[in-house]
C-alpha cells in the first residue's frame, strides 16, 4: 500500500496524528534540535537532549529514536529522525530520513512530520519534497505475496508540515509517482521466476503501457527469426518458455529529441549448459532487473510531463539447459550481421543486448543507455552499492552519471580500453562472447556491447551488484531495489543531446 502524502497547515503541537516525526542534527558540539523538535522538548519539560544523550542517540543520518510525550501533544507519540550534519544535508538525506520514518511508523496509520523544514536555504525545496516523498514510499515498501504470516505496514497517511507552495506540492506528487514506478519494478524482480515467463512479462508490460500512454510492439516465434535476432533466439531456445522481444515507445507531441533505453531481461539464468552452481542460481530470478527498470521508468513519463521521446528495447529470455540449448562453440549471427562464437553460455546477457542495441541504433536516437545485471566482476570492483558506468562519449557518460547522482543511484566510471578488444578475437567468428585471459570481465563485456552500437553516444550500466539488496538499507528493502528507474526518469526529464 502506498501511503497518502499531503501537506497540512497545522502547527506541530496541534496536529492530530499517531506519531510526530521531527528532525535532529549531529554537530561537533553534539545533538542539535531541528524544526518541530522544540515541541517535543516542551512536552518533556526541556529534557529531550538529556534523554537522547542517555540513550546513545547520535542523530546520524536515518537514526531514529522513539520519545514518550505523556499525552501532552496532539500527536500520541514522537520520534526523532537523525539528519546528520546540518551543513551537508542534501536530497538523499531527505530520502533516507523519509524511509527511516516509514519503517519506524509501520505500526501506526497516521504520521505528521516537520522533516521538510530541515532543508537548508541552499537546497531547492521542491526537489527536497520529491526526495522526502520517494523515501517515505520506498521505505514503506514490502513484498508479502508469498508470506503466510504477513504483517503489512499500517501506515496510510503522512502529513507534511511546513511552508507550502505549488512547486513544493508538485515535488511531493512527483516523488510519489516516481516511487510507485520503482515499486512496480521491485515487485517484478521479487516475483519467483516461475511467475514471470517472457510471455507473462510482456502481458504485464502491455497492461502498464496501456494505462500510461505507451505504444507496444512484441516479436515472438518466427518473427524473431525474420528480425534476425540471433542472440535472443540462441539464448532462449533451451527453455520450454519461448523468448519475446518487447519494444516500448513514449512519443509526446512536439518531441524533438529521442532517448533509447535498453534493459536486459533474463527472467531466470541457470547458466545454460555452462551451468551455474546451486548457490549461483539462488538469486537469478533478479537477472531481469534491467528490463524491469526500463518498463517501470517509461510508465511514469506521461504523468511527469516528460517532453523527450523515449524508446525502450527489452529482450526477454530464459536461459536453460536442454537437449536443444545453445552449446559452447556455437556461432550466432546477430541483428547487425556480426557473428559471435559462444564459448560460455552463462555470458548470455550480452548476447541478447547485442540484438537490442543493434535495433536501438537503427532507430537513430540521440543517445542510448543500457542497463544490465551483466558481470559478477563489477561487484568485485565496486561492491553492491555502486554501478559500473562506461560508454563511448565523455559528455554523455557525464550526463548519465550526473543524473544518477542527483537521484542517489551511485555510479563509478570504468574504461573501455581499446587494447583489451583483442581479448574478444575468435578463431571462427567476428568475436567471442567472453574474453581470453584473467580479469577485466566487466570491461571486456562492455567492449563486446560496443560492437553493436552504431552512431549514437552510448552508456552501459552494469548493475549486477546494485540491482539487489541483501538486507534493508536506507530506502532499499531486501530483494530487488529497482535500481535505474529513478536515473532513467531523471535522465528523460533533463535530457540534453550531446553535440557532435
Image (tube, helix red, strand yellow):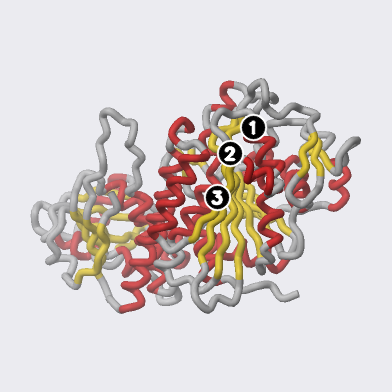
**Is disc 2 surrounded by few (<14), some (14 to 19) or many (20+) residues within 10 Å?**
many
Specify the farthest residue to the right.
Answer: 427
Q: Does residue 82 sit above or below 500 in this rendering? A: above
Kindly indicate whether the residue at mark 2 contacts the one at mark 1 (C-beta within 8 angstroms).
Answer: yes
Q: Nearer the viewer, residue 81 or 194?
A: 194
Question: Which residue is found at the position 33% from the left and 62% from the top?
Answer: 32
**Residue 149: percent from the left, percent from the top?**
26, 29
Where's residue 65, x and y in %?
28, 49
Residue sitting nearer the eye, 487 or 408: 487
Neighbour tally class for label 3: few under 14, some 14-19, many 20 plus, Cα within 10 Å:
some
Could one spot residue 28 in this view of the protein?
A: no
Task: Confirm or deny contact between disc 1 and disc 3 (CB under 8 A).
Answer: no
- Residue bearing mark 2: 243
Q: CA distance from mark 2 to mark 3?
A: 10 Å
Q: Residue furthest left?
A: 71
Q: Which mark is residue 237?
A: 1
Give the CA distance from mark 1 to mark 2.
8 Å
Residue at disc 2, secondary structure: loop
Q: Nearer the viewer, residue 38 or 163?
A: 163
* Residue at x 59%, y 53% (from the top left corner): 313
Q: Secondary structure at mark 3?
A: strand
Residue 218 tag number: 3
Nearer-N-terminus badge (2/3): 3
Residue 454 relative to residue 6: left or right: right
Exactly how many numbered labels are in the figure?
3
Q: In what element is the residue under mark 1? A: loop
Q: Quadrant of the C terminus?
A: bottom right
Which residue is drawn at the image coordinates 47% and 65% (left, top)?
A: 88
Amino acid at each position: 500500500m502506498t501511503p497518502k502524502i499531503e501537506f497540512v497547515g497545522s502547527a506541530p503541537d496541534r496536529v492530530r496524528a499517531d506519531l510526530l516525526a521531527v528532525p535532529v542534527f549531529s554537530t561537533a558540539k553534539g545533538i542539535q534540535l531541528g524544526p518541530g523538535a522544540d515541541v517535543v522538548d516542551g512536552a518533556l519539560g526541556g529534557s529531550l537532549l538529556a534523554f537522547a544523550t542517555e540513550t546513545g542517540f547520535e542523530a546520524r543520518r536515518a537514526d531514529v529514536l522513539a520519545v514518550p510525550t505523556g499525552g501532552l501533544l496532539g500527536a500520541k507519540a514522537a520520534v526523532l529522525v537523525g539528519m546528520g550534519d546540518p551543513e551537508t544535508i542534501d536530497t538523499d538525506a531527505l530520502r533516507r530520513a523519509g524511509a527511516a520514518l516509514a519503517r519506524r511508523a509501520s505500526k501506526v496509520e497516521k504520521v505528521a512530520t516537520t522533516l521538510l523544514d530541515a532543508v537548508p536555504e541552499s537546497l531547492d525545496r521542491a526537489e527536497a519534497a520529491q526526495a522526502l516523498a520517494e523515501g517515505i514510499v520506498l521505505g514503506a515498501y514490502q513484498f508479502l505475496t508469498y508470506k503466510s504470516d504477513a504483517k503489512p505496514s499500517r501506515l496510510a497517511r503522512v502529513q507534511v508540515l511546513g511552508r507550502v507552495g505549488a512547486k513544493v506540492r508538485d515535488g511531493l506528487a512527483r516523488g510519489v509517482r516516481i516511487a510507485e514506478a520503482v515499486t512496480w519494478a521491485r515487485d517484478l524482480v521479487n516475483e519467483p521466476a516461475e511467475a514471470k515467463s517472457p510471455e507473462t512479462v510482456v502481458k504485464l508490460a502491455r497492461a502498464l503501457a496501456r494505462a500510461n500512454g505507451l505504444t507496444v510492439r512484441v516479436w515472438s516465434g518466427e518473427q524473431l527469426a525474420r528480425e534476425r535476432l540471433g542472440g535472443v533466439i540462441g539464448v532462449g531456445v533451451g527453455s520450454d518458455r519461448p523468448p519475446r522481444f518487447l519494444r516500448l515507445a513514449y512519443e509526446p507531441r512536439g518531441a524533438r529529441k529521442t532517448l533509447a533505453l535498453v534493459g536486459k531481461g533474463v527472467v531466470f539464468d541457470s547458466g545454460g549448459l555452462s551451468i551455474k552452481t546451486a548457490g549461483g542460481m539462488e538469486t537469478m530470478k533478479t537477472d531481469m532487473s534491467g528490463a524491469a527498470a526500463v518498463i517501470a521508468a517509461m510508465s511514469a513519463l506521461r504523468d511527469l510531463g516528460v517532453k523527450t521521446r523515449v524508446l525502450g528495447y527489452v529482450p526477454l529470455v530464459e536461459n536453460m539447459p536442454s537437449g536443444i540449448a545453445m552449446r559452447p562453440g556455437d556461432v550466432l549471427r546477430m541483428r547487425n550481421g556480426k557473428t559471435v562464437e559462444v564459448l560460455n553460455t552463462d555470458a548470455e546477457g550480452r548476447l541478447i543486448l547485442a540484438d537490442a542495441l543493434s535495433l536501438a541504433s537503427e532507430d537513430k536516437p540521440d543517445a542510448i543507455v543500457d542497463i544490465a545485471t551483466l558481470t559478477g566482476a563489477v561487484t568485485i570492483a565496486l561492491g553492491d552499492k555502486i554501478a559500473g558506468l562506461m560508454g563511448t562519449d565523455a559528455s554523455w557518460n557525464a550526463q548519465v552519471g550526473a543524473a544518477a547522482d542527483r537521484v542517489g543511484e551511485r555510479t563509478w566510471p570504468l574504461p573501455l580500453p581499446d587494447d583489451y578488444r583483442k581479448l574478444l578475437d575468435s578463431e571462427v567468428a567476428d568475436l567471442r562472447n567472453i574474453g581470453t585471459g584473467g580479469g577485466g570481465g566487466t570491461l571486456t563485456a562492455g567492449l563486446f556491447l560496443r560492437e553493436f552500437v552504431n552512431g549514437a553516444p552510448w552508456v552501459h550500466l552494469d548493475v549486477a551488484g546494485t540491482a539487489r539488496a541483501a538486507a534493508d538499507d536506507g530506502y532499499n528493502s531486501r530483494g530487488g531495489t529497482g535500481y535505474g528507474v529513478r536515473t532513467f526518469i531523471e535522465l528523460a526529464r533533463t535530457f540534453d543531446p550531446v553535440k557532435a
